[in-house]
Image (cartoon, rainbow, N blue to C red):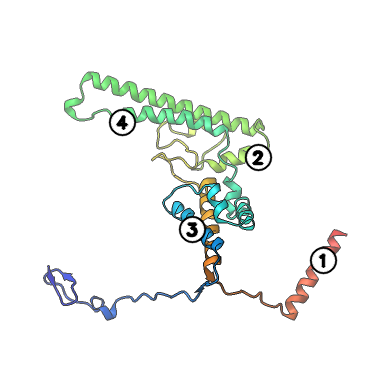
């Protein structure tokens, strides 16, 4: 390696290209905020800013932002807006997964975890030639058979769950929820279901959100209730802090053109006719 005048190290024999020179490297433009700081802060405002900073620091350190912290940092109006943001649906996937895992699948997860544990014990057995004694071979065969038997129990459990959903035992709509919550497409015919799923950890259907290394979809395309709360708490705190500390520009609503106003009036007339 050799150093050059720009304090960069290059291997011997390196042929300089244009991108090695500072003038040819990508330039980053940093925009300076144009908001000015407020000069008329009261003691109450300063106290609120301290409370906001404390809560934001807690959130950035992956600590839970408590309700008392929010009450000290936010006004009553801001607290109401924060509460409303938790109820509102912000992503389409929240409609699909927002109600949480269907209860019938919890029993399936329990049976499947037992089978995975047995399979992990089987895989942990030594496989080197010096360790493949007759006793070890027998133990390996016993553990493998035990794991496969437990996977068969899991398949039977899942088939019972889907069969019950098809009959409507869990109420209307449960069958569709079960399908959505599986990490892969499975042939769900109650008569042939057990024959279409291999009894091994790689082929077993998993519930979305599973942390298993065999899962095809390791996470849910949604915000959990806890993460959603922390996320919108930070947003509420940052907005409140900016409103206190800076003189923010007033955004004026653009005036409607004559054509837009006419279109809105026509839509309103049509709605009124439908109501009548």
Report the Cα–Cα distance between label 4 and label 3. Answer: 55 Å
The local secondary structure at tag 1 comes to helix
Report the Cα–Cα distance between label 1 and label 3. Answer: 52 Å
Counting from the top left corner in percent of width and height, residue 20 is at: 23, 76
Report the Cα–Cα distance between label 1 and label 4. Answer: 69 Å
Q: Nearer the viewer, mark 2 or mark 3?
A: 3
Label 2 or label 3, whichever comes before in sequence order: 3
Label 1 or label 3, whichever comes before in sequence order: 3
> As drawn, is 224 to the left or to the right of 116?
right
Identify residue for label 4: 123
Identify residue for label 2: 173
Identify residue for label 1: 270
Residue displayed at 60% across by 42% down: 99
Front residue (pair 212, 187)? 212
Report the Cα–Cα distance between label 1 and label 2. Answer: 34 Å
Relative to 107, residue 41 above or below: below
Counting from the top left corner in percent of width and height, residue 165 is at: 62, 33
Q: Quadrant of the N terminus?
A: bottom left
Label 4 or label 2, whichever comes before in sequence order: 4
The quadrant where residue 276 appears: bottom right
Answer few, some or many: residues within 10 Å of disc 3's Cα (few below 14, many 20 plus, some between 14 and 19).
some
Q: Nearer the viewer, mark 1 or mark 4?
A: 1
Counting from the top left corner in percent of width and height, residue 239 is at: 54, 62
Front residue (pair 197, 102)? 102
**Do residues under tags 1 and 2 come within 8 Å of each other at their CB atoms?**
no
Report the Cα–Cα distance between label 4 and label 2. Answer: 39 Å
Identify residue for label 3: 50
Answer few, some or many: residues within 10 Å of disc 2's Cα (few below 14, many 20 plus, some between 14 and 19).
few
> As drawn, is 254 to the left or to the right of 22?
right
Answer few, some or many: residues within 10 Å of disc 1's Cα (few below 14, many 20 plus, some between 14 and 19).
few
The local secondary structure at tag 2 comes to loop
Label 1 or label 2, whichever comes before in sequence order: 2
């Amino acid at each position: 390696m050799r150093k050059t005048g720009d304090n960069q190290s290059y291997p011997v024999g390196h042929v300089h290209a244009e991108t090695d020179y500072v003038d040819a490297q990508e330039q980053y433009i940093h925009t300076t905020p144009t908001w000015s700081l407020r000069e008329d802060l009261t003691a109450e405002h300063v106290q609120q800013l301290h409370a906001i900073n404390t809560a934001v620091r807690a959130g950035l350190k992956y600590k839970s932002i408590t309700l008392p912290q929010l009450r000290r940092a936010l006004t009553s109006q801001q607290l109401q807006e924060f509460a409303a943001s938790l109820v509102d649906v912000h992503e389409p996937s929240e409609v699909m997964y927002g109600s949480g895992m269907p209860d019938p699948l919890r029993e399936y997860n329990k049976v499947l975890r037992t089978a995975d544990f047995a399979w992990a014990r089987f895989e942990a057995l030594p496989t080197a030639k010096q360790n493949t004694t007759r006793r070890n071979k027998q133990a390996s065969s016993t553990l493998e058979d035990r794991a496969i038997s437990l996977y068969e129990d899991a398949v039977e459990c899942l088939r019972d769950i889907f069969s019950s959903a098809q009959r409507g035992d869990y109420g209307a709509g449960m069958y569709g929820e079960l399908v959505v919550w599986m990490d892969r497409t499975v042939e769900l015919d109650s008569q042939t279901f057990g024959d279409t799923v291999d009894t091994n950890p790689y082929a077993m259907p998993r519930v979305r959100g599973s942390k298993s290394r065999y899962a095809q979809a390791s996470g849910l395309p949604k915000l959990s209730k806890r993460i959603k709360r922390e996320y919108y708490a930070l947003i509420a705190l940052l907005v409140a802090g900016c409103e206190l500390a800076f003189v923010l520009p007033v955004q004026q609503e653009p005036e409607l053109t004559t054509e837009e106003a006419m279109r809105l009036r026509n839509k309103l007339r049509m709605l009124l006719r439908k109501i009548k």
